[in-house]
Amino acid sequence: MIGAAYFGLFFAAFGAATLLPLQSEALLVGLIVSERYWLWGLLAAATLGNVLGSLTNWWLGCRLERFQDRRWFPISAGHMATSRKHYERYGHWSLLLSWVPIIGDPLTLIAGVMREPLGRFLLIVTLAKGARYGVLAVLTLGWFG
């Protein structure tokens, strides 16, 4: 049953990185506090799941524009233009904010629209999301330690 916790955390982190309203941080904190799981395994599962969720957003962004003229398309032309403008202004370093609630998921999507190179995307997003989970673990251990 211990493996189920890692898989559950992975899938919660994956979903949280997409447009689904999931929270992986609370689950990670609960698993750390339980002291039943290997910390590095938890951090790896959460980071990998979250990065793969962001990669899904990037992939969708790469394919998104061709549907922009459809009536059902969820993003207005104005929002798309504004997003492009911001991404062009701040560039790939804005992906360091990919962990931030509300703006992080759309940011990874627009990176795909802007054709951000995959290697650089993965490097920056992995650093950002891994650091977020690492800081959360340190704070959790310091608080509940």
Image: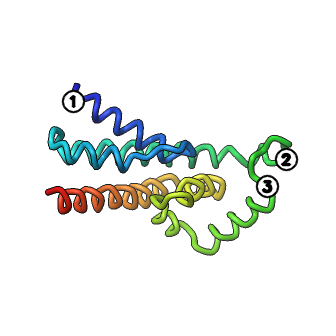
How far apart marks 2 and 1 lie (CA) works out to 48 Å
How far apart marks 3 and 2 lie (CA) works out to 10 Å
Q: Is residue 7 above or below residue 43?
A: above
- Could you say whether the residue bearing mark 2 is in a helix, strand or loop? loop
**Which residue position holds label 1?**
2
Give amino acid for label 3: Ser
Q: Residue at x 49, y 47 (%)?
A: 17
Of marks 3 and 2, the one in the foreground: 3
Q: Residue at x 78, y 44 (%)?
A: 73
Of marks 3 and 1, the one in the foreground: 1
Q: Residue furthest top?
A: 1
Q: Residue at x 48, y 61 (%)?
A: 100
**Which residue position holds label 2?**
69
Mark 1 or mark 2, which is nearer the start of the sequence?
1
Label 1: few (<14), some (14–19) or many (≥20) C-alpha neighbours in 10 Å: few
Q: Nearer the viewer, residue 31 or 88?
A: 31
Q: Position of residue 70 (x, y in %)?
A: 84, 42
Q: Position of residue 72 (x, y in %)?
A: 81, 41
Image quarter (top left, top right, bottom left or bottom right) of the N terminus: top left
- Could you say whether the residue bearing mark 3 is in a helix, strand or loop? loop
Mark 2 or mark 3, which is nearer the start of the sequence?
2
How far apart marks 3 and 1 lie (CA) works out to 45 Å
Q: Residue furthest front?
A: 144
Q: Is residue 107 above or below residue 32?
A: below
Q: Position of residue 128 (x, y in %)?
A: 40, 61
Q: Are marks 2 and 1 in contact (CB under 8 Å)?
A: no
Give amino acid for label 1: Ile
Q: Which mark is residue 76?
A: 3
Label 2: few (<14), some (14–19) or many (≥20) C-alpha neighbours in 10 Å: few
